Image: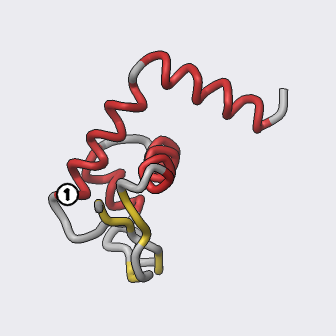
Amino acid sequence: MTARTTSIKALHELQASGKGGIQRARILRALLQRKDMTRREIQRATGIDINAVCGRVRELIDVGAARETEARRCRVTGKTAAPVQAL
């Protein structure tokens, strides 16, 4: 099984469980409470695993609910990262 096949299978399982929608909603709520957040800041604020945060953020960007903003220093890692904000 390739990584892509595994990811697609995991996505289908997540959608079937309804968990993806719950995670997207939690992330969107966190983004609406702040100007912008990096993925690590979202992880810290929501308690959602970083891999899930990255996937859900990508989904929010793809449907036009969020967008990446100008890179800045992450408050969690101290590294430069592109934060996202809710639209």
- The answer to whether residue 2 is above or below residue 60 is above
> Which corner quadrant of the image does residue 12 belong to?
top right
Q: In what quadrant of the picture does the N terminus appear? A: top right
* Disc 1 target residue: 32
Q: Write the residue at 35% across / 36% down.
A: 23
Of residues 79 and 8, the one nearer the viewer is: 8
Name the residue type under label 1. Answer: Leu
Question: Residue 64's spot in the image, x, y percent?
Answer: 41, 56
Q: Residue furthest front?
A: 64
Q: Write the residue at 37% across / 74% down.
A: 74
> Which corner quadrant of the image does residue 70 belong to?
bottom left
- For residue 28, side relative to residue 68 (left or right): left
Q: Residue furthest left?
A: 33
Q: Tell me the SS state at disc 1.
A: helix
Question: Residue 16's spot in the image, x, y percent?
Answer: 49, 17
- The answer to whether residue 3 is above or below residue 10 is below
Q: Write the residue at 36% across / 51% down.
A: 43
Q: In what quadrant of the picture does the C terminus appear? A: bottom left
- The answer to whether residue 81 is above or below residue 19 is below
